[in-house]
Image (cartoon, grey):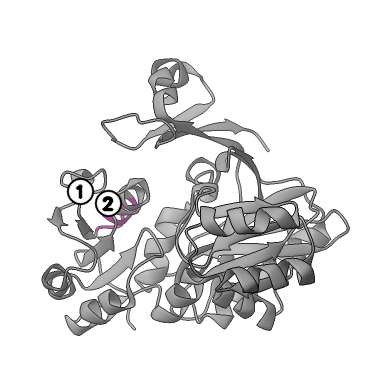
Amino acid sequence: MAPLPPGSTLGILGGGQLGRMLSQAASRLGFDVVILDPEENSPAGRVSRGQIVAAYDDPTALNVMGRVCDLVTFEFENVPAASIEVLAGGGALVAPGPTALSTAQDRVAEKTFLNVVGATTVAFAAVDSLADLTAAVTRLGLPALLKTRRDGYDGKGQAWIRTAKQAAAAWKAIGEVPAILEARADFTRELSIIAARGRDGSIAVYPLGQNHHADGVLATTLAPAAVDAGTDARARAIATAVLDGLDYVGVIRIELFDLGSGELLVNEIAPRVHNTGHWTQDGCVCDQFEQHIRAVAGWPLGPTTAHARVEMTNLLGEAVNAWPALAAEPDARLHLYGKAEARPGRKMAHVNRVKPL
């Protein structure tokens, strides 16, 4: 396709902080943005040309969005397949495409795909019943992590099984829904890589970031991570294999386990911009949000070289109330999401502390 010209209208499903930062990036490139989100006056809606207030599977709203927008993208991956069909039926281009979304929505399909393209994961087993779980525990060994096949993030929808007697309780804890059991990975640290693929097949990969979690939620990302040339090359090869294997268009996040022996395992992918890529806003000329807009709009991909070392810290709940002190830090760049209510655990903002390389 020809590059989408400035002045075109871009639609975003999702009105949270990722949609907000995507909208701001699109506006800088001259696009008008329309948000679809069930929450009136959403964070993304307030910085966009307009917002359609409706459910993500509302056929009327989707049809309107498909007719109004030249291109539609997403801030989250759990978009119903039927919604994509309605959007496309309205005439809009949709990216990322249905293959990437359907793969990322099902953890068994995701891990199967990853291993097919040579991006090795931990051993796993599909679980559809307590009997399946019992057999999987025997085959994979313990401890092991039980996760719902669909949905769930930031530690939700999962349970550790450390002894065979805990299997039934874990099955009940996740709601007795289709699941995946994953063998434990004995890793030294978690890394993530943000990468993009354009409509012409070109690929751009950012430096690796190193992540730290607290209570199952991302706390900090430090980037560029300290890695040797071999680890960097392997991560880039994994990103290329995943992007090409999905015929992907847009930005993707790939979470990696560093085993400390030169081996990397892929934990999961997220077919969208991601929290672990926020460091690029102040560490790179072209951040992940602009990169995603460039990719889906058919523009040339931007540079990914880091010009600074960045520590990204999430501000959850009332931690955002420290904004006056954070704003006074000379090396800190504060990114507030425009959310009114600071509920416990809610992502309200992030701060990037910028240092020379």
Q: Residue furthest right?
A: 261
Say how many tags the image has.
2
Label 1 CA crowd tier, 10 Å (few <14, some 14–19, many 20+): some
User: Residue 88 appears at what percent x and percent y?
Assistant: 24, 81
Q: Are marks 2 and 1 in contact (CB under 8 Å)?
A: yes
Main SS, magenta region, reads helix
The relative height of residue 144 versus residue 298 in the rendered view (above or below) is above
Depth-wise, is mark 2 or mark 1 nearer the camera? 1
Whether residue 165 is in magenta: the answer is no
Residue at position x 63%, y 54% from top? Answer: 192
Residue at position x 80%, y 48% from top? Answer: 188
The relative height of residue 66 versus residue 187 in the rendered view (above or below) is below
Quarter assignment of residue 218: top right
**At label 1, which amino acid type do we have?**
Glu
Report the residue marked by disc 2: 15
Residue at position x 53%, y 53% from top? Answer: 173
Label 2 CA crowd tier, 10 Å (few <14, some 14–19, many 20+): many
User: Where does the C terminus fall, quadrant-wise?
Assistant: top right
The relative height of residue 310 versus residue 51 in the rendered view (above or below) is above
Quarter assignment of residue 138: bottom right
Whether residue 28 is in magenta: the answer is yes
Q: What SS does tag 1 mark?
A: loop
Report the residue marked by disc 1: 39
Magenta segment range?
25-30
Drawn side of residue 107 relative to residue 258, left or right: left
User: Residue 106 appears at what percent x and percent y?
Assistant: 50, 72
